[in-house]
Image (cartoon, coloured by chain):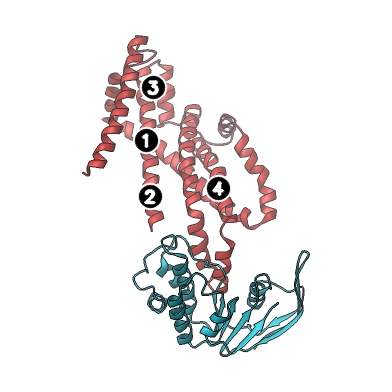
Chain colours: A cyan, B red
Amino acid sequence: MIKLQNVSLRFGEREVFRDFSASIPLSGVTAVSGPSGAGKTTLFRLILGLQKPDFGTVSGLEGKRPAVVFQEDRLLPWTDALGNVSLVSDEKRAAEALAAVGLSGSERLLPDQLSGGMKRRVALARALAYGGDLLLLDEPFTGLDDESKRAAAEAIRRAGLPALIITHDASEAALLGALETIRLV
Amino acid sequence: MRPEKTKVILKELAILAVYLAAWEAASLLVGKELLLPSPPRTLARLFELLGQPESWAIAGMTLVRILSGFALGVAGGILLAVLTARSRFAEELLRPLRSVVKATPVTSFILLALLWLASDLVPLFIAFLMVLPIVWTSTADAIVHTDARLVEMGRVFGLSKAKILLKIYVPSVLPESLAACTTSLGFAWKAGVAAEIIALPQRSIGYQLYESKLRIETVDLFAWTLLVILLSMLLEWLLVSCMRRIRHD
């Protein structure tokens, strides 16, 4: 269980969280939803330990290996799709993950030769190939058409890992079969 | 050979012919070989020099001195770049040193080096000083501007420090560092030969240039200078070819 207890965080004048508490199960799929600026990505960063709260505690990921899709694709521009995915896994696994998200045949393309949706799928393939303990996905379906979304959701489900998905779109959470939704306002 | 490549070569030969014609015209106009020898005389002397093993030994020694200084400058520049990019204290401590090296006239360094070092080492030291600040500044800048989000991604995925260095920092920094190497090689070469002219190490192109000037053998002066230019172009071409290969790997 990931636990956020009495978390408070400000960026200058802007208060993102005040005495915020939540529990996120490390099983099944949990969604975090809310409008833009509600603090979804900040929550994601707090959970990953990339952002420290001003007050309160975040726990539950100690010793775990999260497989992450960041809000941005964060692909290495100098290496191809296969190189990007095999950065965190072996090449066989990387090729399988790319195939699972519908990118067979695009392994040798560089990021600047990929469309926005294809880049997103490479970032997802990287997380799937990593083979961590849980998936942390920040808006993983951005730029994907309906068919690609369904294929990507299927690949995530097949991974069989507990997942936390950050999304502003309730239908995307439903697509992954999210059991629980944490709403930020 | 592909037609486009043939076209490029023909164009370059035509440009070369224009320059040679201008040189010949100027030489005829001046009318004194002592002041401006003609291209055929200079080229004949150059080929004569190239036919002598001693000339190759002299050019080889100059190359060894300057390339050693260049290699040391690149290594030192990268080392200092890593240090100053990672430590604010080191950056503040070493910034004045970099500014001094950049601002000091080459001739001052050559004269000082003459006091401190054997004449053979002066060109090496000067080449080192030419390369060091250029590679240092460019590489440090590239390290600082490496996309922090990519480094963060690497850490989140549990990559080792060595893998983050090799897979993220090195490819990110490489284009800037290689460009700095190309620029600084030209400076090192020119300043290195200038240092040889002043320090006069035996078996050096600089010594030959000085001797030619002393004996008022302008044809020799031109032929050795032409050799310096050709070697500089050859070195730059070799370095650029190596860089292309490294970038594509």
Numbered tag placed on residue B231 in the rendering: 1
Instruction: Please rate how many residues cluster around mark 3, counting C-alpha atoms within 10 Å: few if below 14, some from 14 to 19, many from 20.
Output: many
Residue indicated by mark 3:
B221
Instruction: Please rate how many residues cluster around mark 2, counting C-alpha atoms within 10 Å: few if below 14, some from 14 to 19, many from 20.
Output: few
Viewer-side residue, B172 vs B198: B172
Is disc 1 placed on a helix, strand or loop? helix
What is the CA distance from the residue labelled 3 to the residue labelled 4?
A: 36 Å
Co-location on one chain, circles 3 and 4: yes
Residue indicated by mark 2:
B242
Q: Name the front one of labels 4 and 1.
A: 4
Residue indicated by mark 4:
B138
Query: Which tag, 1 or 3, sits closer to the chain's start?
Result: 3
Query: Which tag, 1 or 2, sits closer to the chain's start?
Result: 1
The amino acid marked with disc number 4 is: Ser
What is the CA distance from the residue labelled 2 to the residue labelled 4?
A: 19 Å
The amino acid marked with disc number 3 is: Leu
Along the horizontal axis of the image, is B227 left or right of A38? left
Q: Name the front one of labels 1 and 2.
A: 2
Co-location on one chain, circles 1 and 2: yes
The amino acid marked with disc number 1 is: Leu
Is disc 3 placed on a helix, strand or loop? helix
Q: For the point 41% across and 65% down, which residue is it?
A: A80
What is the CA distance from the residue labelled 1 to the residue labelled 2?
A: 16 Å
**Residue B135: image location, x then y, percent:** 53, 46
Do tag 2 and tag 4 residues touch (Cβ < 8 Å)?
no
Viewer-side residue, A88 vs B181: A88
Co-location on one chain, circles 4 and 1: yes
**Letter of the chain that mark 4 sits on in the rendering:** B
